[in-house]
Image: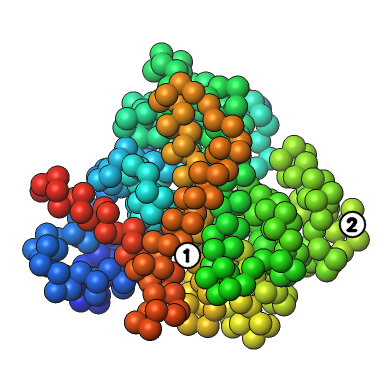
Amino acid sequence: MSTLCTDLDTFMSGLEKRNPGQPEFHAAVKEVAADVLPFMEGKKEYKNECLMERLTEPDRVISWRVSWKDDQGNVRADRAWRVQFSNAIGPYKGGLRFHSSVTKSVLKFLGFEQIFKNSLTGLPMGGAKGGSNFNPKGKSDDEVMRFCQSMMTEMHRYIGPETDVPAGDIGVGAREIGYLFGQYKRMANQFNGALTGKGLSFGGSAGRTEATGHGVVYFMREMMRDCDDDLEGKTALVSGSGNVALYCIEKLITQGAKPVTASDSSGFIYDKEGITRDKLEWLIDLKENRRGRIKEYSEEFGCEYYPDKTPWQIPGDLAFPCATQNELLGDDAKALVKNGLIALAEGANMPCTADAQHILRSEVLYAPGKASNAGGVAVSGLEQSQNAQHSSWSREEVDERLKKIMTNIHDKCAEYGRDGHGTKIDYARGANIGGFVKVADALLKCGVV
Ligand code: NDP
């Protein structure tokens, strides 16, 4: 490794050589390094500190086998990881993802992003991510429970309220966190805040379920406010129909906007009249309780359904990709801009490809996920505080704190991302540098570790 590396191409070719076959991780690092390396240039305090090289090497990656038995009595074996990326500013913190597409590269990309996101919240949380290629779709509750118990039997050794605090992500919702926490208590013989996203009856925080989706809309509201505009009457395109998407739609409705799309991995619905509160309640029940498909919404409410398509060709003022990574391509970004898009806030992690980001950053207001979807981890941080104090705060109190945190993140992005004329804000640059500064400062002050 070099001691000082300010050239992006040289830095990336070294990183790619050290981490072969990890395209998602390469893309995530490149996006950050393109802003941070020029920022560090010429700054005396960063000289010879090898900061980006240190930050792109996880503290550790743990991987293990998860054996479990399905309902037919067959033994199954899946693979799990925990990437403990950086505890420079606090205990490791980041979600667990259960999906067949999970690889070490995907979790390294997510863990790396999490370092900057957690730093932006202003709370003392390091960056981590974990998960398994186990696919919970179509599995019975008993199968999911047996898998979670087996996974935690190993994972409990590496986590704890002062060490590493996992949470949910794709495929890991309230049910999975409950099973994981049940097994954690049994193995550790402790009831503590080693996991967040817990149910309200066993240490969870009010408002955590809604936090990411609501937070994305709060962030969008701040972006619009900065341009003397608001959300009232704006047509909004949302992708996904999971945790983030559903509560993004909910907050859009209460803010007077008109959400018209939602999707899952089979296709999307286009409800020209707008998704109303009543329709949303039906959709939340479909997705959270009946575990149904988005197509059923079009059958229930008689709107358009497009199988195997994403919603980005539909005209809209605002866009909220809330499903998964790389779901919005360069051509989608072009179509959105052509159709008059004003702003896009990412609910998912890295849903826009590099091509799409490039177009959106120059043409519209573009909020990267590490800033706009930080509300979830922020309320997880608040859950940790409540657990540590053996107290619980009201929904209103948590919501007030969430609003304040999202406004602060917006302002931090503006501080580091506003152009020389003080007008346009490059939120991606602002988030990368704003997230980096605090972590770099902590790394420098803690010696060579
Ligand atoms: P959920 O599992 O609750 O929902 C995911 C949604 O995305 C589902 O509608 C799913 O459809 C859809 N989806 C998943 N994979 C694909 C795909 N390949 N193509 C199209 N649609 C797909 O996850 P969350 O809502 O929790 O997470 C969504 C995103 O937000 C992720 O990127 C996650 O990392 C990010 N995020 C989540 C946070 C949270 O608090 N939950 C916090 C910050 C970021 P289907 O049911 O068909 O799979």
Instruction: State the image coordinates of residue 171 (x, y, percent, origin top left).
Output: 58, 43
Vertically, is 390 above or below 397? above
Instruction: State the image coordinates of residue 368 (x, y, percent, origin top left).
Output: 47, 65
Q: Amino acid at mark 1?
A: Pro
The quadrant in which the C terminus is found is top left
The quadrant in which the N terminus is found is bottom left
Q: Nearer the viewer, residue 391 or 247?
A: 391
Residue that mark 2 sits on: 301
Question: Residue drawn 38% across and 83% down?
Answer: 421
Q: CA distance from mark 2 to mark 1?
A: 33 Å
Where disc 1 sits, the SS reads: loop
Residue 224 seen in the current view:
yes
Upstream in sequence: badge 2 or badge 1: 2
**Whether label 2 touches label 1, CB < 8 Å:** no
Specify the quadrant of the image occupied by residue 430.
Answer: bottom left
Q: Is residue 280 left or right of residue 109?
A: right
Residue 308 seen in the current view:
no
Instruction: State the image coordinates of residue 6 (x, y, percent, origin top left).
Output: 18, 73
Q: Nearer the viewer, residue 137 or 169?
A: 169
Specify the quadrant of the image occupied by residue 21.
Answer: bottom left
Residue that mark 1 sits on: 368
Given this view, does label 2 or label 1 mark the residue nearer the observer?
Answer: 1
Q: Is residue 448 left or right of residue 8?
A: left
Q: Amino acid at mark 2?
A: Phe
Question: Residue drawn 66% across and 29% down?
Answer: 141
Question: Residue drawn 57% across and 57% down?
Answer: 218
Vertically, is 216 above or below 4? above
